[in-house]
Structure formats: C-alpha cells, structure tokens
C-alpha cells in the first residue's frame, strides 16, 4: 500500500513536469520567445499532475478504448481547468488566462480547442506515456522511492509558499498603485479648484510615487506577469494593466 501511494505521488511529479514542458513549448511558439509558463516558479504545472492522476483513475475501466478515453478525458480535464480557474479568481482575485475570445468557451476559463487537445493528451497518456513511466517507477527500490518522494514534496511545498507570497505581493502592489492613483486624481481636482501651490507640489510627489510603484517590481512578480500575459485583476483592473505595461517596458529596456 505504501509503495502504491509513493508511486502515485511520483506520477504526479512526472506529469506535472511533462505538463510544464508542453505548456512552455506551446506558449513559447505562440509568443515567438521563451516563456517560463506555470503557476509555480519551478518546472512544474501541478494542474497537469492532478489532471493526469484523475484521468488515470477515472479512465481505468476504459483502458484500450481510445475513442471513449478521448471524450471522457476531455470532459474530466476541462472540468478540472474550469474549477482551477475559478479557485484562482476566488482566492487571489486574478484571472490568469482568458479564452473569452475563442469559440465555444465557458466563462473564458475553458474552450473547445483546449478540450480537444486535452482529450488527445489523455489518449497518448493512457496508451503510451503511463505504461512507460509505470514500468520504470515501480521498478525502483522502496527506500529510493521514499527518499525521492520526500525530497520532491519538500521542494513543491517551498515553491507553493513562495508563489502564494508572490501573488499576495502582486495584489498588494496593485492595491497601493490604485490608492496612489486615486489620491493623484483627487489632488489634481483640488489643484484645479483651488490653484494652491501646495496642491501642485503634492501632485508632483504623487506622480513620482506612482511611477516608482510601477517600476519597483520584484523578479518573482515580473515572472508571473510574463508567464501569464493575459492576467487580470478582478478588483483593480486599471492598476494591473499599468503594472503589466511597466513590466513590459522594463523587460524591453533591459534587452537593449
């Protein structure tokens, strides 16, 4: 029983890495540049790991029937993607991807094209990839399995903490930007009404503060914004767009 649990944990890591590779290649080709795709900082996409385990469990009775695996797999993985998108929007008030411009999408969280691709991946996973991984992983000694599993779980836990901290930092960043922008507009309004020199000085200071906020971003924040160029803030959409623009300008300047 212990070996079975450890093997499935290692399957999760294998398919998380494989999913990260697929996402990175797919997005890099579309962007015509290397994109470190993924919610986490490391080369892992946990949603693919969970999706693979879910698919392997749900489709076990369908093993050997590619057509049924395709349709059921597409439904299961699309449901997982939808729930993941909803959770991220609910917890972090951010929308990391948006398929609203694609045909046959549901609330911009899932779309027909992705569902078809997921269905095809499920067929490949069931018929070729998983049997290969299972043969090698299940052949490892119990001690090596346990040590490898513990090491990888420690790395994943640390990465999750760093990523959550980064998203909270981004949220705090754009919240401060929004507050500064509102103060700026209010001070401009006061200056227009009263024409006070003090108000003019306050406007200059707030403008400088807002510009500093837009450019003073942490490397982890910039990675998140580059990895998900369509990221949106549910609470502060304007501040998020300004931050994304500032990060793109920073990256262009750094390349020059």
Image (cartoon, helix red, strand yellow):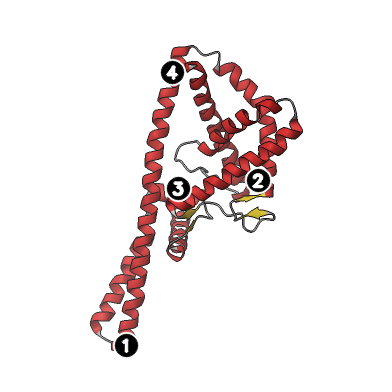
Q: Earlier in the sequence, mark 2 or mark 4?
A: 2
The circle drawn on residue 193 is 1
Q: Can residue 45 be seen at all in this image of the molecule?
A: no
| Residue located beneath label 3 in the image | 223
Q: Quote the CA–CA distance across marks 2 and 4.
A: 35 Å
Q: Earlier in the sequence, mark 3 or mark 4?
A: 4
Q: Residues within 10 Å of mark 1 (few under 14, many from 20)?
A: few
Mark 1 lies on a secondary structure that is: helix
Residue situated in front as seen by the camera: 102 or 201: 102
Q: Is residue 55 left or right of residue 116?
A: left
Q: Residue at x 24, y 83 (%)?
A: 197
Q: Is residue 13 left or right of residue 189?
A: right
Q: Earlier in the sequence, mark 3 or mark 1?
A: 1
Q: Can residue 177 be seen at all in this image of the molecule?
A: yes
The circle drawn on residue 146 is 4
Q: Quote the CA–CA distance across marks 3 and 4.
A: 32 Å
Q: Residue at x 63, y 31 (%)?
A: 58
In this view, the mark in front (3 or 1):
1
Q: Residues within 10 Å of mark 3 (few under 14, many from 20)?
A: some
Mark 3 lies on a secondary structure that is: helix
In this view, the mark in front (3 or 4):
4
Mark 4 lies on a secondary structure that is: helix
The circle drawn on residue 101 is none
Callout 1–callout 2 Cβ contact below 8 Å? no
């Amino acid at each position: 029983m212990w070996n079975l649990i450890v093997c499935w944990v290692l399957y999760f890591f294998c398919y998380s890495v494989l999913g990260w590779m697929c996402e990175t290649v797919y997005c890099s080709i579309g962007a015509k540049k290397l994109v470190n795709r993924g919610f986490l900082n490391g080369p892992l996409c946990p949603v693919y790991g969970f999706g693979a385990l879910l698919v392997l469990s749900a489709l076990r009775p369908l093993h050997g029937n590619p057509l049924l695996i395709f349709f059921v797999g597409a439904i299961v993985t699309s449901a997982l993607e939808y729930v993941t998108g909803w959770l991220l929007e609910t917890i972090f008030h951010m929308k990391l991807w948006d398929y609203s411009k694609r045909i046959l999408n549901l609330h911009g969280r899932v779309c027909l094209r992705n569902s078809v691709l997921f269905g095809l991946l499920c067929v490949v996973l069931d018929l070729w990839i998983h049997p290969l991984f299972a043969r090698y992983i299940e052949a490892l000694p119990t001690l090596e399995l346990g040590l490898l599993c513990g090491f990888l779980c420690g790395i994943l836990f640390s990465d999750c903490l760093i990523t959550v901290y980064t998203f909270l930092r981004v949220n705090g960043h754009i919240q401060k930007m929004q507050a500064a922008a509102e103060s700026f507009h209010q001070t401009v309004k006061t200056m227009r009404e009263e024409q006070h020199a003090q108000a003019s000085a306050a406007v200059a200071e707030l403008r400088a503060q807002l510009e500093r906020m837009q450019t003073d971003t942490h490397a982890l924040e910039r990675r998140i914004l580059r990895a998900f160029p369509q990221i949106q803030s549910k609470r502060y959409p304007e501040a998020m767009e300004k931050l994304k623009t500032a990060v793109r300008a920073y990256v262009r300047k750094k390349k020059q």
